[in-house]
Amino acid sequence: MSRDAEYADTTQKADQGVEPTGKFRVYFGAVAGVGKTWAMLDEGWRRYKRGSDVVIGFVETHGRAHTAQQIRDLPVVPRKVVDYRGTTFEEMDLEAVLARKPEVALIDELAHTNVPGSGPHPKRWQDVLEILDAGIGVVSTVNVQHLESVADAVQRITGVAVRERVPDWVVRRADQLELIDSSPEQLRRRMLHGNVYPPEKIPSALTSFFRYQNLVALRELALRFVADETEEELLGFLVARHPDIVWDTAERIMVVVTAAPGTDAVLRRAARIALRAHAGLHAAYVVGDDRSRPVPKQALKAIKHLAEDLGATWHDIVSDDPAPALVHFAKENQITQIVLGASPASRWEQLTSRSSVVQRVLRFARQSGIDVHVINRYGESAPQSTAGAPDDGGG
C-alpha cells in the first residue's frame, strides 16, 4: 500500500469511529539511540499529512542525519536564544508554542533541564504540563534512566549518576506510552556505524555506559515499566466490565522515611516494590516531641518532595516511640508491607543491648501479620561518575 493510500485508509477508519490518539503520547526507551525521536517525528508527520495542525516545539537530532531527515516539512516554532554565563543556548520557547496554539506539539527529551532564564519552569516536563493544560496535545520522548523511581538502580548498574530526572507520575499521565525497543547487539552496531554518537565519543561510550551488560539491564527496566503500565490498563478494563469481581489483591505499601542520608534510596526501592505490586505507596515520618535533636529541614523537605514525585501519600505520625506508632498506623490503614532502612547499630545500642527501631518494628509487625522489607540504607549508593552518561541522549 502506498503512503498516500495508507493515509486515506487511516482517515477512513477514523471516520468510522476509531478513537483518535490521546492528548499526551510518550515514546519510551532503554537508552539514547533506540529511535525515540525518529518515531516521534514520524508520528507527527503522519498526523500532519492527515490534516492535523502539528508543530515542532523542540527536537534535538544530536547530529543524526536519519533523524534530521524525519523533520521533512513539519512547521517549527523558532527556539528561544538564551545567554547564560557567557554562553549562548537554545531552548524551547514555551510562550511561542502556547501563542501558536497547534493541535499537537512535538517536544523532545521530557527530562531536560532548562537553562536558567529561558522560561518560567526549571524542567521541560513542567513546560509540557502547561502546554497540555492549555488543551494542546503533546508527543514526547524519555529514557528509562531518567525516571525518578529507578534512578538509583541505574546508578548502581552503570556507575553513572543521572542528573536529568522526571517524576514517574508525569510519564504515567501519558494517554499512550510506547516502547521503542532495540536489542543490545543492534544498538552497539548502530553505535559503531556512527548512527548514535559522533566518532570521537564512540570508544568511551562502548566501554562505559553502553557496555553490553548495562544495555541488557536497562532494557529489562524499560520492559518492566511498560509491562506494569499494560497490566494496569488491563485491570482497569476488567474492573470496568466486571466490577463485582476482585481482579487484584489490595496491597498497600508503607515506607518509613527520615532525614538521614540514604533515605532517598529506601524511598525509591519502596516505590519499585509498590509499582510491581500495583499497590498504593504511603510515606510515614515520625515526628517526636523531643526537641534536643534538631531535624535537618532541607533534607526532610527534599525527601518529602521526592515522595511526591514518586506518587506517595505523606503522613506525619506524632510519637516519642516510633516502632509501635508505625505498626499501629499500618494496622489502622490496612498496610500489608512495611519498607524501612537499616543502619549500623549505634555504640549505645551495642553497649546496652538495646533493641533498634528496626528490630522492634519487626517484632510488632510479626505479631500483626504485616510483612517487612529491611533495606540497607548505606549500601544503595554507587560510584559517582559522569563519563559516557547520555543525560540528553535523544532518540
Image (tube, grey):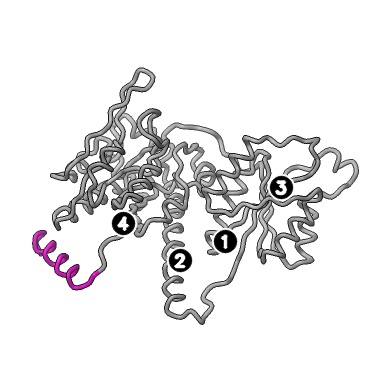
Residue 61 location, x and y as percent? 26, 39
Quadrant where the N terminus is found in the figure: bottom left
Residue visible at 31% across and 29% down in the picture: 200
Q: Nearest to the eye among marks 2 and 3: give it.
A: 2
Residue span colored magenta: 1-18
Please check the rendered image and state whether residue 243 is part of the magenta-colored stretch, yes or no. no
Graded by Cα atoms within 10 Å as few (under 14), some (14 to 19) or many (20 or more), the crowding at tag 4 reads some
Q: Amino acid at mark 4?
A: Lys
Q: Amino acid at mark 2?
A: Glu
Residue visible at 42% across and 46% down in the picture: 212
Which residue occupies the foreground of this view, 299 or 154?
Answer: 299
Label 2 or label 4, whichever comes before in sequence order: 4
Residue visible at 66% across and 47% down in the picture: 257
For this view, does 103 lie left or right of residue 230?
A: left
Q: CA distance from mark 3 to mark 4?
A: 43 Å
For this view, does 245 lie left or right of residue 201?
A: right
Q: Nearest to the eye among marks 2 and 4: give it.
A: 4
